[in-house]
Amino acid sequence: MQMVQKKRNEAEAKIIDGKTLAGRLRESIAHHVSVLVDDHKIMPGLAVVLVGDDPASQVYVASKKKAAEQAGMRSFVHILPKSTSQDEVLKLVKTLNQQKKVHGILVQLPLPKQIDADTVLKEIDPAKDVDGLTIANMGRLMAGLPGLVPCTPLGCAMMIKEVEKNLTGLHAVVIGRSNLVGKPVAQLLLRENCTVTMCHSRTQNLPHIAREADILVAAVGKSGFVKGDWIKPGAIVVDVGINRGADGKLSGDVDFESASKVAGHITPVPGGAGPMTVACLLGNTLIAACRQNELTVPHLG
Ligand code: GUN
């Protein structure tokens, strides 16, 4: 706690190395997968559905497939053309719901405009919803019940806990209210006894509120949106943004250069929330496989 409150603007922020942390988590998952295969002849299977040819989504899906295979899981990637109808996607999801070898289903977002994401997500069996985006899993998170939790928020919470084990009483400010990140990350921090403030595009005096944060999570999708003078000295800053510039370079939602002069700890982009998201997806697939076979869920990481 003291670490968060201490003034440390004379020093550069410590980097929270999401890549290394994700590597450790993936090793632990791979170990538990091998036990599941050896002892129970169950190989966790992850199905990823990609509709269309969005270049960023193609990169994400390829990295999820590779990571699943490296962890010893089965990976089923379904690539459908951009013109695919909603009914065809629903039909595929229904088929995947029935397949025994598929323990986790992820429909990569965004979907082409003729397809309503909520309708598709609603069709996924909550037990296989490794993205944690079905109403059932969102409700479970809100109610504090066990379920499947969205991967990026899980990864963010793990990175924060790597710095500070006890978050009780800390003020967390979340910028962004998406179902994918903002809302679930706020729930996870609430579960850790943080006082949580949710901010969004209509929030007034955002820099002032951000400066009150012991933990600041930025998930807005705007490159360099959060400036150094929005940050409380010593704060833990988690950058969820993955923005690609015209030069192809990735940048986060936080202006790293100015922020790292004020924050106590900060996640980099790339190398922060991105690799942790992939590792948590594997974790959720393993958890889903265990639960579907009524086996004890191992402690990961
Ligand atoms: N698109 C960008 N991030 C995600 C994610 O975490 N899950 C899904 N399904 N789509 C995404």
Image (cartoon, rainbow, N blue to C red):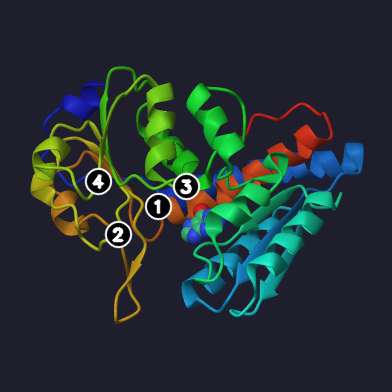
Mark 1: few, some, or many residues within 10 Å (few <14, many ≥20)?
Answer: many
Residues marked 2 and 1 touching at CB (< 8 Å): yes
Task: Determine the image quadrant of residue 258.
Answer: bottom left
First reached walking from the N terminus: tag 1 or tag 4 = 4
Secondary structure of the residue carrying tag 2 is loop
Q: Which label lies toward us, 3 or 4? A: 4
Which residue corresponds to mark 4? 200
Q: What mark, if any, has residue 152 been given in the picture?
A: 3
Q: Is residue 301 visible?
A: no
**Is disc 1's CB within 8 Å of ligand 1?**
no
- Please state the horizontal and vertical placement of residue 172, each as a whole percent of the image: 27, 31
Q: What whole-number distance in Å separates the C-alpha atoms at marks 3 and 1?
A: 10 Å
Secondary structure of the residue carrying tag 1 is loop
Q: As shown in the figure, which amino acid type bears the numbered disc 1? A: Gly
Q: 69 or 171: nearer the eye?
A: 171
In the picture, measured across the screen, residue 141 lies left or right of residue 171, that is right
Q: What whole-number distance in Å separates the C-alpha atoms at marks 1 and 4?
A: 22 Å
Q: Which label lies toward us, 4 or 2? A: 4
